[in-house]
Amino acid sequence: MSKQIQVSGLDAYYGSHKAIEDVSMTIEPRSITAFIGPSGCGKSTFLRTLNRMHEVIPGARVEGKVLLDGDDLYSNNIEPVTVRRMIGMVFQRPNPFPTMSIYDNVAAGLRLNGRVSKAQLDDTVEESLKGANLWNEVKDRLSKPGAGLSGGQQQRLCIARAIAVKPQVLLMDEPCSALDPISTLAIEDLMAKLKDEYTIVIVTHNMQQAARVSDRTAFFNLAEQGKPGKVIEMDETSRMFTNPSQKATEDYITGRFG
């Protein structure tokens, strides 16, 4: 079900400003890939190019190729909405729909995709909440507002909402930065389970988190202030954290800068 992403020669712009330059990488299926690097070096921008969320910003554009199992996601005959259905996204701050119940939060994407029977909705909501390791905590209050859950539960609710539409890839933009350590651990445990089914890409500022959860890591950096961000190196996470090939990577991981 999960798919390989191949990126080649990708540049991303905000108007005339080039934010990232010449990014090429392969993201393997059923694995977790972490993007690390100092603030402002283009990690989140690059993440949003993978499901065509970048172009939602007025004046933003992308050059280069993003292939999902060989299909060009920026081809003229692929709708951005279709891409976003295949490649789900979980944001930095938990963002359940505030006026909707827990049940309706999870079911929202399914309803957008067309007519679905009540039985099918019930099954998918339960399956998705179980997949997000949240079912046992909320099964007796599915009609209560999603916004009434704790921060960690809200983030797992957002993950349940993302997986309900059966994507092939899950993008996570600093999904734990607003959470306490216990909720963070719950999300990390969840990621480890979900990678059996999904290709997962995570942006994180937490070096320990990248080391704990990811299979591969890409280090982004700026050559100098005002220049576009680039991928300095990408490798197996264990190697990146013990024997990086670039001094800048080592300096960032050991906290000498960033």
Image (tube, rainbow, N blue to C red):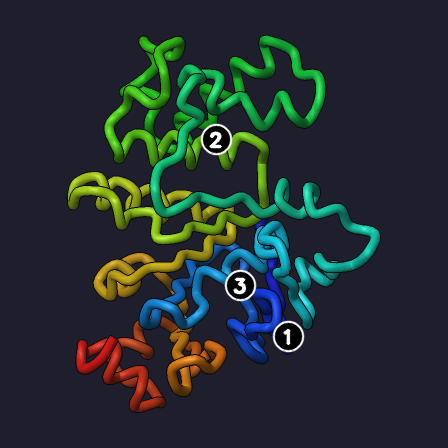
Residue 253 percent across, percent down from the top left: 24, 76
Residue 102 percent across, percent down from the top left: 40, 18
User: Tag 1: Cα neighbours inside 10 Å, few (<14), some, or many (≥20)?
Assistant: some
Judge whether 119 appears above or below 238 on screen: above
Residue, x 41% and y 68% (percent of image)? 216
Q: Looking at the picture, which amino acid does disc 2 mark?
A: Arg
Foreground of the two, 45 or 161: 45
Name the secondary structure under disc 1: strand
Q: Looking at the picture, which amino acid does disc 1 mark?
A: Ser
What's the mark number on residue 161? 2
Residue position marked by numbered label 1 in the rendering: 8
What's the mark number on residue 28? 3
Kindly report the distance in space between the C-alpha atoms of the residues bearing marks 1 and 2.
30 Å
Closer to the N terminus: mark 2 or mark 3?
3
Q: CB under 8 Å between callouts 3 and 1? A: no
Kindly report the distance in space between the C-alpha atoms of the residues bearing marks 3 and 1.
15 Å
Closer to the N terminus: mark 1 or mark 2?
1
Judge whether 42 appears above or below 52 on screen: below
Residue, x 45% and y 60% (percent of image)? 44
